[in-house]
Amino acid sequence: MLNQLTAAVQKLSPRLRKIISNISWLFADRILRLGVGVIVVALIARYLGPEQFGLLNYAIALVALFRIFATLGLDRIVIRELVHTPACKEEILGTAFILKLLGGAFAWLLAISTIFLIRPDNSLSHYLVAIIAAGTIFEAFDAIDFWFQWQIKSKYTVLAKNTAFIIVTCLRISLIVIQAPLIIFAVAIATEILLGAIGLVIAYKFNKQTLLALRPSLRRAKSLLQESWPLVIAGVAIMIYLRIDQVMLGQMAGDKAVGIYAVTTRISSVWYFIPIGIVSSVAPSITEAKRSSEELYYSRLQKLLNLMAVLAYSIAIPMTFLAKHVLVIMFGENYASGGRVLIILVWTGMFWFLGICKSQLWIINEGRTRYNLIEKSLGAIVNILLNFWLIPIYQELGAAIATLISYAFVDYLMCFIYPPARRVGWAMTKALTLNFFIQRKQN
């Protein structure tokens, strides 16, 4: 069996073998975090209890609202530029690094200003947000990861960040054992990002690259920002409908409701590494197909959407029946009331899986960043309005329903409202209805 598998792999093209290897490393990264990270989060949730765990996640959610300013929507744009103009890599990466550094500092200031505004008398919230938000500054070093993604060498990023993850995981367990106060858990979050940045620098140097060779360019910065600014605003909208539910829960229903809701989102979103890992690895191949043939481009995109739908169904259906049992086993009876919330949230994964393909591939390759801005902004508005309506009535369950409707609206229904996106919308419909299985049986 092993010999047959080896022989089959050898028949693949060198580029395809490289892509498969890249996906394997990304999956190994997320599986480690899935297996170890979720267990540690469960231990922290049990130790802190719903209220303190809710306060910690409230702070994390608030910082996440502004995190887009640390990334500036540059990820896919920078990689595309590296593919198209590899001779300018030092200028592209150097400019991306400086932009992300400035953006991270801006995100930190925004987060601190906001928490002082909405919770003026809660000093613990102020400290938590200030410490967690400091991590956004260190995310500037993720510009190095663009080079690894371009070279399809994600194993170095995985090794760098997983080393940081393992170190901080041991630290978190130690904090539980010594019964550390809540604020130290916030320090651990920022520490992991800092150690990951150091690891990326070391990995970059190991590949005979150096940060000193990077040369930022004002002209390049203007060019990147001119294209990415709609993605930044769209990213703010994305974070609003991804995270505003926890912030609004904290303001309208209290930190305990946030704690219960947070553990359900941890479980429902733990699978989100699957589409991100796959898309980041196949993106160069699909981008190249776009340049050579429109039919080949949409054919590959359809196959990717089909795969996403199958994976999403294989997660959502079992979790629908096991939700409450999973919560009680992992987090304890204090979180049992989140069972119905988890059932709702696991089905949002279907639209997340498909939406990643649309936002990271179709929108970037078609240059539809302004459409992305409009749809994400509308999704954020829909989510906020639904939260205002549903949270006072159903609390965390209302937030989950609002999230599901918002995801479906943005990632799927908006395709049919915007004519150029209808072809993608019908491709998603084929994937959702498992049309490719029916066609296969007919053939």
Image: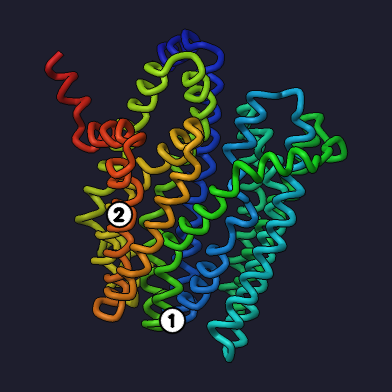
Q: Earlier in the sequence, mark 1 or mark 2?
A: 1
Outermost right residue: 212
Q: Does the rendering let one see residue 23? A: no
Q: Which amino acid does label 1 sit on?
A: Gln
Disc 1 is placed on an element classified as helix
Question: For this rendering, which residue is in front, 331 or 114?
Answer: 114
Q: What residue type is labelled 2?
A: Val
Q: Residues within 10 Å of mark 2 (few under 14, many from 20)?
A: many
Residue 435 lies in quadrant: top left
Estimate the x, y position of residue 347 in percent, counting from the top left: 27, 52
Label 1 or label 2, whichever lies nearer to me, is: 1
The answer to whether 5 is drawn above or below residue 118 in the figure is above
Taking depth in this image into account, of 133 and 159 the one nearest to the observer is 133
Residue at 50%, 67% (x, y): give it: 61
Count of marks, rendered view: 2
Q: Mark 2 points at which residue?
A: 346
- Which residue is the site of mark 1? 251
Residue 204 can be seen in this image: yes
In the rendering, at what x and y percent does residue 164 appear?
Answer: 66, 52
Of helix, strand and loop, which one carries label 2? helix
Residue count near mark 1 (Cα–Cα under 10 Å), binned few <14, some 14–19, many ≥20: some
Left or right of 406 on screen, residue 207:
right
Residue at x 52%, y 20% (from the top left corner): 288
Residue 382 location in percent, x, y? 34, 62
Residue 239 lies, with reference to residue 47, above or below; the image says above
Residue at 29% x, 44% y is: 417
- Disc 1 and disc 2: Cα gap in Å? 24 Å
- Percent position (x, y) of residue 140? 71, 51
Colour basis: rainbow
